[in-house]
Amino acid sequence: MRNRFLRVFISLLCVPFVLSIAHSLVGAQTQPEKLRVAYTVISPTQLNVWTAKELGFYAKHGLDVELVLLVGAPLAVTAMLAGETPIIHTGASAVITSNLTGSGAVLIAGSVNRFPYILFVTDQIKRVEDLRGKKFGVSRIGSADNAAAQTVFERYGLKADDVAYVTIGSVPARLAAMQSNAIQATLLQPPETLKAKEIGVRALLDFTKLDVEWQQNGVAVTRDYIKKKPDTVRRFMRAFVDAVHYNLTNAKGAQKVLQKYLDVKDEKAIEESYNEIVLKLTRRVPYPTAPGIQLFLDQLKSRNPKAAQAKPSDFTDISFLKELESSGYFDRLYR
């Protein structure tokens, strides 16, 4: 009897300790994983990563995401390879170029598979061919806008070295450079286009109307990161496609997110940005475009022999999107 009482007494003493351990284990399991995610420009093309943050989709899938702006795709890719921002939303051209050097960088989703730009020029430029020998402002050499310009200009007979591409940085900096005639052209997106018209520079060519598949940007990681943290990538992709769904089906909510990040008060400008970029260019199931990647590889062939031997699938890992699609995830979202 005495021994039985002693055992019961000891058991009662252990209960708080056991409960404390159990609570700690549960807390550890439910604690959101901290993750830094980079994006490369203040533009409507970045809306999906912003919406996932603002609407709580990252948190819903167990991620505590810190969004970081790193201007220009080459800078974001460098940060990804260093492990500082292991997942990035960035221009595809820099990812492809990096992959050709053996970095293992791949796209796991393709956000925009068309050109999202409008070419703006100063008064001295009357046609695209007039850009020969002129200065063209880009966010960063090797960035998505740089690659897009070179690709389109080749159709007008302009080779890469026919135009002087200059790193200017942000859109305000490029607009200021055009006003002072430090550069004679640049690529812009809504609502930047309205600001350009206000200062008197002219739209020459609307790239969005070109019937050309082009891998503008997307979500990128390294193959090593996929091997080390496949579940993190999987949860990020769920949050990302949740954001895509929200943006395509909740115009007012999506425009509120745009207004916050673009820091534009003009509601008409926000509506134009949403209609011309988000609605027009966003795909429900955001697979990268193989023809769009091949187009860039064809452009690189003359400068990088490795591009001639490569195929679009070398630069993508669509297994996470396929997994979501086969599980019926998209069907449930859009029903």
Image (tube, rainbow, N blue to C red):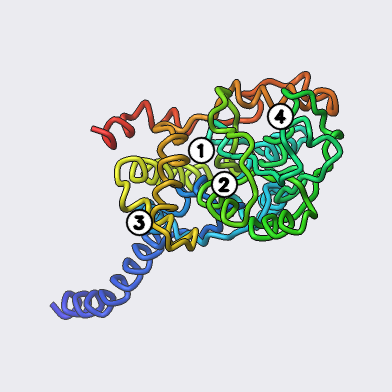
Residue bearing the label numbered 1: 111
Q: Amino acid at mark 4?
A: Thr
Q: CA distance from mark 3 to mark 2?
A: 18 Å
Crowd class of label 3 (few under 14; some 14 to 19; many from 20; radius 10 Å): some
Residue placed most toward the observer, 192 or 64: 192
Whole-percent x and y of residue 186? 69, 45
Q: CA distance from mark 1 to mark 2?
A: 9 Å
Q: Is residue 43 left or right of residue 57?
A: right
Q: CA distance from mark 3 to mark 1?
A: 18 Å
Crowd class of label 1 (few under 14; some 14 to 19; many from 20; radius 10 Å): many
* Residue 89: mark: 2
* Residue 55: mark: 3
Q: Are marks 1 and 4 in contact (CB under 8 Å)?
A: no
Residue at figure coordinates x 51%, y 47% from the top left: 190
Whole-percent x and y of residue 254? 36, 51
Residue bearing the label numbered 4: 151
Whole-percent x and y of residue 279? 40, 38
Q: Amino acid at mark 3?
A: Leu
Q: Earlier in the sequence, mark 3 or mark 4?
A: 3
Q: Amino acid at mark 1?
A: Ser
